[in-house]
Amino acid sequence: MIETKTASIALKTEIPGPGSKAWMERRQAAVPRALGSVLPIVVAHAHGAVMEDIDGNRYLDFAGGIGALNAGHTPASVVHAVQEQAAKFLHLCFTVTAYEGYIELAEELNRRTPGDFAKKTMFANSGAEAVENAIKIARSYTRRPAIIAFEDAYHGRTLLTTSLTSKVSPYKAGFGPFMPEVYRMPYAYCYRCPYNLTYPACSVHCASKLEEMFLRHVSPDSVAAVIFEPQLGEGGFIAPPTEWFAEIARICRKHGILVIADEVQTGFGRTGAMFASERVGLVPDILCTAKSLSSGMPLSAVTGRAELMDAPGAGQLGGTFGGNPVSCSASLAALKAMDEEKVDERAMRFGRIFRSHAERWQRRFSVVGDVRGMGAMQALELVRDRTTKEPAKEETQRVLDYCHQHGLLILSAGVYGNVVRLLAPLIVTEEQIEEGLTILDAALEHVSGQRLS
Ligand SMILES: Cc1ncc(COP(=O)(O)O)c(C=O)c1O
């Protein structure tokens, strides 16, 4: 498949090919430019961890629909479940008449998510909508208005979630005014510690700063919830030390503030456990999921303590398509498929293989400043200078371009645009992992031009 077995990696083809190019011109004319395009190709079909475009070029997909494809492209059991449900009914609207799949899936998530207490789950269409509903529920339960979010957070593109999101360009610029009563503090970005401290000597000083928010910015009895991603996604795959979570949760409990974990990108095996919260010993009050929940069908979920979830009265939550029957059936099949494939174990194996390569890259290429992440949610932060840590944004783009031209679809991340992140489907084979990392190795060598030894 991907031509990477030899030491010198042959350029695959010109991208985009003639077929894709024609469609990209039509896309430009018909679709607003704000809808960006990482790789200007048009896909004909995709299975497992491989996509093929309409010009016949094959790509190893290490972007995985931005983390929505932990079970891979078109898992047979999910496709079958979609077909079967589509033939029964496509849509009813759960708030008009119930159907089994919604209830069964809610039970599954109540059982699977961390926390040994009664839970309830509601469904929506997107990750952003899940976060929106989580905030509404938290406010309704606590009767408090404020939310604390973190620097470099990404929670979606609706106006409320854009307010919670931290990266200005492209997500916020020109879209204000934003929702009031959102307060922000630095995340545990150890590589660029905002307090110039070093872990573990710092004793996660950044987490204890939450108490200072209550001195300078907002009264704790006005705060409904603290929301965070257990490992940042768009913000650069930053993974705080586990003690950070314990300290944040301790302070929240002390002040009656709810903990909302946004596991839209980290969920369903990605970090080496079904939920990243489990990996870091966190039991959130509310947990938001989407993406790999349903193998790419539009669906998101809010799962939380039963008493919180029941705070809004009848009719206060819902929406026409939320928990669509076809998406629920896809999700039930996807959860089963991910169990059978042991995606959490596969994520750990991916992480181990990646780290063994990345340690060599750190020795060989000065551009590799930091290597980080949990399980298969791994990333490289690229810098121009290891002392000044000047972000290597252009170099990162060139790494991506090289990978794309050689058949590996890969994404960047981070507020400086200098993080190469991996979101491969977790069903990717060991051979495919090696192939993908061989291309990334060549890309780093191509771009770095500077070997340490
Ligand atoms: C952590 C996190 N939260 C929320 C979202 C928004 O999800 P959606 O794009 O489905 O609205 C994303 C999307 O990337 C995400 O990574």
Image (cartoon, helix red, strand yellow):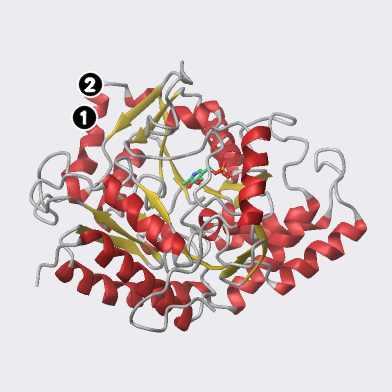
Tell me the SS state at disc 1.
Answer: helix
In the image, farthest residue toward the right: 88
What count of labels does the image hold? 2
Q: Residue at x 64, y 31 (%)?
A: 312
Disc 2 versus disc 1: distance between alpha carbons? 6 Å
Q: Residue at x 32, y 65 (%)?
A: 443
Considering only vertical position in the picture, is 431 above or below 301? below
Considering only vertical position in the picture, is 326 above or below 357? above
Q: x, y (%) of residue 355?
A: 29, 72
Q: x, y (%) of residue 99?
A: 84, 52
Residue 347 shown left or right of residue 57 in the figure: left
Residue type at numbered disc 1: Glu
Rate crowding at label 1 as few (under 14), some (14 to 19) or many (20 or more) other CA atoms within 10 Å: few
Residue 63 shown left or right of residue 247 in the figure: right
Closer to the camera, 397 or 249? 397
Tell me, yes or no, whether the two marked residues, 2 and 1, touch with CB atoms within 8 Å: yes
Q: Which residue is mark 1?
A: 212
Query: Does residue 328 appear in this view?
Result: yes
Residue type at numbered disc 2: Arg
Q: x, y (%) of residue 76?
A: 72, 73
**Does label 1 point to a residue whose CB lies under 8 Å from ligand 1?**
no
Tell me the SS state at disc 2.
Answer: helix
Quarter of the rendering containing residue 225? top left
Image quadrant containing the N terminus: bottom right
Q: Which residue is mark 2?
A: 216
Quarter of the rendering containing residue 56? bottom right
